[in-house]
Image: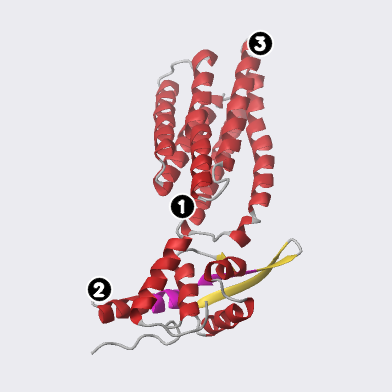
Amino acid sequence: MLKELNPLLHSQLRLAIMSILMNCEQASFVYIKEQTQATAGNLSVQLDKLEAAGYIKVEKSFQGKKPLTTCSVTDAGKLAFEEYVNTLRDYLDVK
Amino acid sequence: MEDKRLNNQESLELITSMINKTKRHLHIGQGNLLLWWGYVSAIVGLLVGVSLLLTGGNRACNWLWFLIWIVGGIGMMVINRKDKDRIEKEPFTYVDRITSNLWGTIGWMFALGTLISIGFMFFGKDSWEVMLVFAFLLAGFGSTMQGFILQEKSMVAGGAFSLVAGTFVLCCVLSGVKLTITWVIPLFILCFVATMIIPGHVLNAKAKKQC
């Protein structure tokens, strides 16, 4: 029997965020917003959900006088993403 | 992009598309630090060579080598400060982390080697040659490793050349062959052209094309 896909990752924007962060060590809010073309408000909400699940770490700092928000994926996030991709492969019968 | 549910096929396509979008090996100005250290080292090498020739080989001219640390260090701080703006526009990749740690380690090793060599001088041992060997080998090692990480052949080739040159100079020092200004300084300059200047320009050109 096939496993259920992780509902937290099975959403367009959250999956896009996780895919970006899996590919780099750290990315800024501005960069993720540009790549996903999401609105700032929606992106913030989805980042909060991923952070609450322990999948990502959000750090707020300042670069000069400008605020800088950076995100990185946690070990739990990496594991969840890998499981999600493996389950997806099983569903689609991709070897 | 919204918070909508996807079907399985769409999920896979989204993951692939995001990975492709963020996949990059280089960023604009990737070669700037290499170019800076390469040019500073080559110019200071030339300066030391000319000073030694003009003074009839006065060993005190060797203290000019420290200009590499002073000028290079100041320039590196300026370049790094400018590079901080990049954090917002581009992601910090695992390759960035490895590269930064690699050159950081090499910098510390060279600093330690220099300090130990200076320590030897207090006991009357002339260890300028040892510092030269350090420069050849460490720059060569760093360049070769970064070349492998970035899959940049010019860096691997330049680094390998410097490693061979460093090994040769080390053998000369160990077997008592005199290092003369006429060949060791040009070799030093050539090594920094091969390990840093040429790859730095190649990386910048490739990054310009890629970004």
Considering depth in this image, is B128 or A94 the residue closer to the camera? A94
* Badge 1 element: loop
Q: Is residue B5 above or below residue B66?
A: below
Q: Is residue B137 above or below residue A38?
A: above
* Residue A75 part of the magenta-drawn span: yes
- In the rendering, at what x and y percent does residue B142 appear? 47, 41
Specify the subunit that label 3 lies on. B
In this picture the colour scheme is secondary structure
Q: Residue at x 64, y 43 (%)?
A: B76
- Residue A83 appears in the figure: no
- Residue B87 is labelled as none
**Quarter of the figure with residue B185:** top right
Circle 1: is it few (<14), some (14-19), or many (20+) Cα within 10 Å?
Answer: some
- Residue B181 appears in the figure: yes
Q: Residue at x 45, y 59 (%)?
A: B23
Closer to the camera: disc 1 or disc 2?
A: 2
Kind of residue at badge 1: His
Q: Which residues are magenta?
A: A69-81
Location of mark 2 (residue): A94
- C-alpha span from label 1 to label 3: 46 Å
Location of mark 3 (residue): B54
Of callouts 1 and 3, which one flags the residue occurring earlier in the amino acid sequence? 1
Considering depth in this image, is B180 or B199 the residue closer to the camera? B199
* Badge 3 element: helix
* Badge 2 element: loop
Closer to the camera: disc 1 or disc 3?
A: 1
Marks 3 and 2 belong to one chain: no
